[in-house]
Image (cartoon, grey):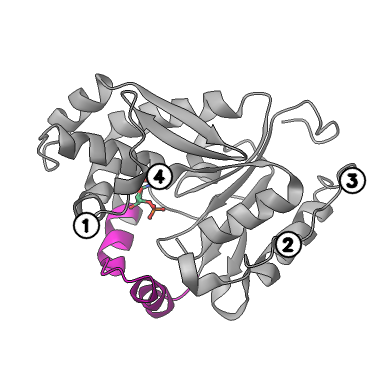
Amino acid sequence: MNKADTSTSTVVIAIDGPAASGKSTVARALAARLGYRFLNSGDLYRAITWGCLSHGVDCREAGAIAMAVGNSRVELGCDGTEYYPIVDGTDPRVHLRDAAVNANVSPVSAVPAVRYILSAVIRAQAQGRQMVVEGRDIGSAVFPETPYKFYIDAPVQVRQRRRRNQGQTEEIAQRDLIDSTRSTDPLTIASGATVIDSSSLDVAGVVNAMLEKLREHGLLGGIGILPMVPGSNRQDADAT
Ligand code: DC
């Protein structure tokens, strides 16, 4: 990673954290302010889970999942500045938060072959680009070499409340347990990551704290910072 010339080199800002910590919201807002592209890697894991479910794969069977994902074509489309997953030529975005996907995405994403395949897709996309990438293992396993790492956290009660406000019944504590105890690339605070608790800050507060850190790291020397997009400061509305 080249710190000096950010106009042509690969720059990845890695943002990890547990479910409903607000990382997607702040990652999207940060990308907009920097003029970078945004990739939500959880959507890739959700898309693959949807693909397995729609082919009738038993999501308790690691071998069956590995075979199904190995036989799938996983790509990224780009909607303006934001990437989205495409599985076997289909855009599954409307299904990514279906109850069945919510229930199965953590076990599917614990399968090592799935992680290997999706991490390769993410790394290939970042080549030569400036991107904000969010997930569970972005700073620890996908881009361990990036100097720009954040871990967004919030107490489990706050995160559960955010999901309820979104009209979702997702079992946050159970997801935390599976994501942080799986054997391959578990959710963890990457070495060198700046930890930010989002429970007492609004989106602009978190983004400003990140910009401050990036400035300390020398990333923002040559680039202009855009203003917040109107309406993007609501954390509880869509925190993921
Ligand atoms: O961020 P999210 O809740 O949409 O992620 C859905 C699941 O995907 C989550 O339970 C763990 C998995 N995931 C992962 O294992 N690694 C990532 N980099 C991103 C998500």
User: What residue is shown with label 1?
Assistant: 99
User: What residue is shown with label 4?
Assistant: 43
Looking at the image, which residue is at 27% across and 48% down?
105
Q: Nearer the viewer, mark 1 or mark 3?
A: 1
Q: Which residues are magenta?
A: 154-179
Tell me the distance, in whole angstroms, between the alpha carbons under discs 2 and 4: 24 Å
* Residue 60 place in picture, x, y as percent: 11, 43
* SS assignment for the magenta stretch, majority: helix
Tell me the distance, in whole angstroms, between the alpha carbons under discs 1 and 3: 44 Å
Q: Depth check: 127 or 149 in front?
A: 127
SS class of the residue under badge 3?
loop
* Residue 173 place in picture, x, y as percent: 29, 68
Indicate whether residue 17 is drawn in magenta: no
- Residue 221 - label: 3
* Residue 102 place in picture, x, y as percent: 26, 55
SS class of the residue under badge 2?
loop
Tell me the distance, in whole angstroms, between the alpha carbons under discs 4 and 3: 32 Å
